[in-house]
Image (tube, helix red, strand yellow):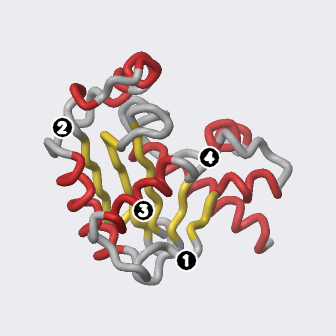
């Protein structure tokens, strides 16, 4: 499974942080990506007040959006084969990342995930709140380990989406 998440400068803005985790069939993490731009790339007041404080422990790793996209595209292409690609509430943010990767020529016409699996639909189908993977985790006593900052850390958000997706899939299989 390949799970990814991004934090953006406002809901419709460019990403300034991207996290991705790749898991084997047993659920063990086998690869990770984290990229972050400087705080100066963020101008949206809500993001400044609610997101930046939660990701202070994530080091700035890139200086431009183009560099962040290029490095994420390389990681994505190296790790996507044979994987379910999972997000939580992937429209608008994660879909924009994929569209930007394509527009920049970093992925080809057939490199997008088919399908992009959005755990929010699975949650709704199971009678759960589709907007909150955190409440589902708490309700079912699930854990993802330690990630600094919790929600809004794109690695944490990737991990939660993956754990919830795997848990829901196991419920269906039972």
Ranked by sequence position, the earlier of labels 1 and 4 is 1
Q: Residue at x 45, y 54 (%)?
A: 96
Q: Residue furthest right?
A: 127
Question: Of marks 2 and 1, which one's residue comes earlier in the chain?
Answer: 2
- The residue where tag 4 is placed is 142
Name the residue rendered at 42%, 25% in the picture. 47
Q: Is residue 93 above or below residue 85?
A: above
In the rendered structure, which disc, 4 or 2, sits on the residue that comes first in sequence? 2
Measure the alpha-carbon separation of dots 3 and 4.
Answer: 29 Å
State the image coordinates of residue 119 (x, y, percent, origin top left): 65, 57
Q: Which mark, residue 114?
A: 1
The percent coordinates of residue 56 (x first, y second) are 28, 26
Q: Is residue 52 above or below residue 120?
A: above
The answer to which quarter of the image holds residue 52 is top left
Whether residue 120 sits left or right of residue 29 in the image: it is right
Q: Secondary structure at mark 4?
A: loop
Q: Which mark is residue 60?
A: 2
Q: Secondary structure at mark 2?
A: loop
Q: How many marks?
A: 4
Q: Is residue 127 left or right of residue 13?
A: right
Residue 98 badge: 3
Q: Residue at x 50, y 72 (%)?
A: 26
Taking depth in this image into account, of 112 and 134 the one nearest to the observer is 112
Q: Nearer the viewer, mark 3 or mark 2?
A: 3
């Amino acid at each position: 499974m390949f799970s990814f998440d991004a934090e953006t400068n406002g809901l419709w803005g460019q990403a300034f942080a991207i996290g991705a985790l790749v898991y084997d069939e047993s659920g063990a993490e086998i690869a990770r990506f984290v990229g972050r731009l400087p705080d100066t790339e963020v101008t949206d007041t809500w993001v400044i007040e609610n997101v930046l404080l939660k990701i202070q422990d994530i080091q700035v790793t890139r200086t431009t959006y183009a560099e962040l996209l290029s490095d994420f595209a390389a990681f994505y292409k190296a790790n996507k084969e044979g994987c379910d690609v999972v997000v939580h509430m992937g429209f608008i943010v994660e879909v924009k990342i994929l569209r930007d990767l394509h527009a920049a020529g970093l992925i080809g016409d057939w490199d997008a995930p088919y399908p992009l699996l959005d755990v929010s639909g699975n949650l709704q189908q199971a009678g759960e709140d589709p907007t909150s993977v955190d409440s589902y985790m708490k309700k079912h006593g699930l854990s993802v380990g330690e990630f600094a900052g919790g929600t809004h850390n794109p690695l944490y958000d990737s991990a939660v989406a993956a754990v919830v997706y795997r848990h829901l899939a196991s419920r269906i299989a039972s």
